[in-house]
Image (spheres, helix red, strand yellow):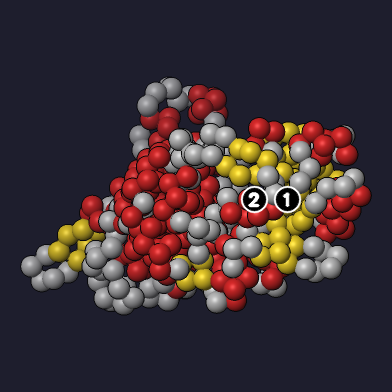
């Protein structure tokens, strides 16, 4: 990627244009972090970029944005510009091509407004971004109120950057962020979803959630999660504190940090605030919070426009997370059914995080993980084996079709999963004996 980005700069410069690496890649480079992608800022207009790179395509020509693909890598090439007002709180109503100074002053935060020459290693800093980076400060470029008024998504981006890079949000920037917190209502559900997912899958998800709560944003975008704050739990199982603290700790501990795992962890106790009860002796309970929470999780995912399949998976993990409590009492059939679920890896990941963020007991996790390992040693996937007996077999035995067929077939399935029968012949013979014995 680096070699291709250098080639792109060389070709632009040879054609007489100014060109630099810009934004997040420069920030990451100065922090010693691996580069995820490289963006280019240039004096070349989109049509001039396209003339130099025939495979280029416009993704926002009116905003000066062109995508250039070189040897399997895609680079966003943006023309130096200044911007007009943002009437829709997302995109500028107009842009005017300009120079590097104008380009730097229209960017969001100073640490994202740095320009870099990969050949001379020279950094162009027109807004104090390098000094802020050294001081671990996140500061808006220019007037923070104007920056947040232009694009409300910057409210979420500010928190994501601060959490991910260990930055302290500069005083005036933080004050403006809190003041403009209600503006997140203007952001589309999809954009909120994507920013939250980036925060949650990062290594500082707990801090991001705390900042969202302190800024007054969490009660707007995820009121069900904000409602966890202050909800007491029994100290025997939750010495760490209230439901909110427990959830933040769990989100920090979940591994691997896939979108499914982090969202299911975030929402695994979302049903507790609405199911909280305390008896006269002071015993706290959350009756059926797993089932209530599963429905709430489904509604949250739908509200954030997650794909239906993903929403269902999150809800399933939330609904199943309490089942580990009885794992030691499961028979072979119950265990086989549980580990055959498509979400089993996420079930394990969420239970591990849940346990590490509370009582620390991982014995149930190891019990289920061992059963999963044994099942996988016998087959490529621990799915349930094919059924041994069908309704046709029952008819052949002389039984009359009816509602009782379901119960008979379910009983045969239990025998099979408990390894009491292993072949079709054994299963049919046992059905014959049981039915004859039953009259």
Q: Decide if residue 143 is on the left or right side of residue 242.
A: right
Mark 2: which secondary structure?
helix
* Residue where numbered disc 2 is placed: 103
Label 2 CA crowd tier, 10 Å (few <14, some 14–19, many 20+): many
Kindly check if marks 1 and 2 are in contact, taking CB atoms under 8 A apart as contact: yes
Residue appearing at x 87%, y 35% in the figure: 51
Residue closest to the eye, 341 or 265: 265
Residue closest to the eye, 355 or 101: 101
Residue 393 vs 13, above or below: the answer is above
Q: Quadrant of the N terminus?
A: bottom right
Residue 218 vs 408, above or below: the answer is below
Residue closest to the eye, 271 or 73: 73
* Residue where numbered disc 1 is placed: 41
Locate residue 52, reporting x and y percent. Answer: 88, 39
Residue appearing at x 21%, y 58% in the figure: 276
Q: Decide if residue 336 is on the left or right side of residue 34.
A: left
Locate residue 266, reporting x and y percent. Answer: 42, 57
Residue 335 visible, this angle: no
């Amino acid at each position: 990627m680096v070699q291709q980005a250098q080639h792109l700069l060389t070709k632009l410069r040879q054609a007489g244009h100014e060109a630099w690496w810009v934004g997040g890649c420069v920030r990451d480079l100065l922090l010693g972090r691996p580069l995820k992608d490289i963006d280019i800022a240039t004096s070349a207009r989109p049509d001039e970029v396209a003339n130099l790179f025939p495979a280029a395509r416009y993704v926002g020509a009116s905003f000066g944005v062109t995508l250039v693909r070189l040897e399997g890598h895609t680079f966003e090439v943006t023309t130096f510009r200044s911007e007009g007002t943002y009437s829709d709180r997302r995109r500028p109503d107009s842009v005017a091509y300009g120079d590097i100074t104008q380009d730097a002053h229209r960017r969001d935060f100073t640490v994202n407004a740095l320009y870099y020459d990969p050949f001379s290693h020279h950094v162009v800093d027109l807004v104090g971004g390098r000094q802020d980076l050294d001081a671990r400060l996140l500061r808006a470029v220019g007037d923070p109120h104007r920056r947040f008024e232009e694009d409300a998504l910057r409210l979420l981006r500010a928190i994501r950057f601060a959490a991910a890079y260990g930055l302290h949000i500069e005083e005036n920037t933080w004050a403006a962020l809190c003041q403009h917190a209600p503006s997140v209502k203007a952001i589309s559900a999809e954009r909120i979803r994507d920013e939250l997912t980036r925060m949650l899958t990062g290594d500082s998800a707990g801090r991001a959630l705390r900042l969202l709560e302190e800024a007054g944003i969490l009660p707007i975008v995820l009121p069900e999660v904000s409602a966890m704050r202050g909800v007491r739990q029994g100290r025997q199982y939750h010495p760490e504190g209230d439901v909110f603290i427990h959830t933040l700790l769990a989100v920090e501990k979940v591994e691997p940090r896939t979108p499914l795992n982090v969202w299911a962890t975030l929402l695994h106790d979302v049903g507790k605030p609405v199911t909280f009860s305390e008896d006269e002796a002071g015993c706290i309970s959350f009756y059926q919070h797993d089932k209530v929470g599963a429905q709430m999780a489904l509604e949250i995912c739908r509200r954030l426009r997650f794909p239906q399949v993903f929403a269902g998976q999150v809800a399933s993990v939330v609904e199943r997370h309490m089942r580990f409590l009885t794992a030691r009492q499961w028979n072979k059939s119950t265990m086989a059914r549980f580990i055959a679920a498509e979400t089993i890896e996420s079930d394990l990941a969420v239970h591990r995080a849940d346990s590490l963020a509370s009582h620390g007991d991982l014995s149930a996790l190891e019990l289920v993980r061992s059963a999963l390992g044994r099942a996988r040693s016998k087959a490529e996937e621990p799915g349930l084996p094919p059924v041994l007996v069908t309704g046709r077999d029952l008819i052949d035995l002389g039984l009359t079709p009816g509602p009782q067929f379901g119960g008979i077939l379910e009983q045969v399935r239990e025998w099979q999963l408990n390894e009491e029968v292993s072949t079709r012949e054994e299963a049919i013979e046992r059905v014959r004996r049981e039915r004859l014995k039953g009259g």
